[in-house]
Amino acid sequence: MSTYTQIIFHIVFGTKYREKTLTENNQDLLYKYIAGTLMNKKCHVHQIGGIEDHIHILTHVHHTISVSELVRDIKMSSTDFIKRNKLFPNFHGWQEGYGAFSYAPRDKKVLINYIQNQKQHHAKKDFHQEYIEMLTEHEVVFDEKYLF
């Protein structure tokens, strides 16, 4: 029997100390690189975006890889890519953790739009507020002192 899955993950993680180091001029190069990493792992990329202190990835995760392995590989390879190509001179790495939230396929268009409009969204609320809202919406139990 073959394996079939349709699990869409919204993955979110920030820069180390939430420093605003992902300057706009090279963000697209970073997103393309991450998309390539995802495709190499047989994941389907729906959208990647963000602002200076965090990124959002909307993807279908292939059934042969765990989300934690995927995020680890994205962070490690993108850090190397950023440093090797000197994309963001003040970048010191990614935060230790991440958020990963599952969604139904019917939510895909809304999430793509949300990720594409991060600049407008963050004109009204910061990453801290956004992340707490995501955790709360998904009923994730957390202690705020360990978030940032």
Image: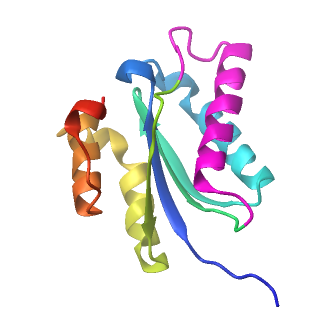
In the rendered structure, the answer to whether residue 30 lies left or right of residue 15 reads: right
Answer whether residue 143 is visible to the viewer in this image.
yes
Q: Main secondary structure of the magenta part?
A: helix
Residue extending farthest bottom: 1
Query: Which of 25 and 32 lies nearest the eye of the viewer?
Result: 32
Residue 24 drawn in magenta = no
Q: Residue at left 41%, top 26%?
A: 52
Q: Residue at left 75%, top 54%?
A: 39
Residue 29, relative to residue 3: is it above or below? above
Q: Residue at left 29%, top 57%?
A: 140
Expressed as whole percent of the image width and height from the top left, the position of residue 20 reads 38, 20
Query: Which of 146 and 58 lies nearest the eye of the viewer?
Result: 146
Q: Quarter of the image containing the C terminus?
A: top left
Expressed as whole percent of the image width and height from the top left, the position of residue 71 reads 59, 44
Query: Which of 21 and 42 lies nearest the eye of the viewer?
Result: 42
Give the quarter of the image for residue 15: top left
Residue 111, relative to residue 14: is it above or below? below
In the rendered structure, the answer to whether residue 46 lies left or right of residue 81 reads: left
Residue 68 drawn in magenta = yes
Report the span colored magenta.
64-93
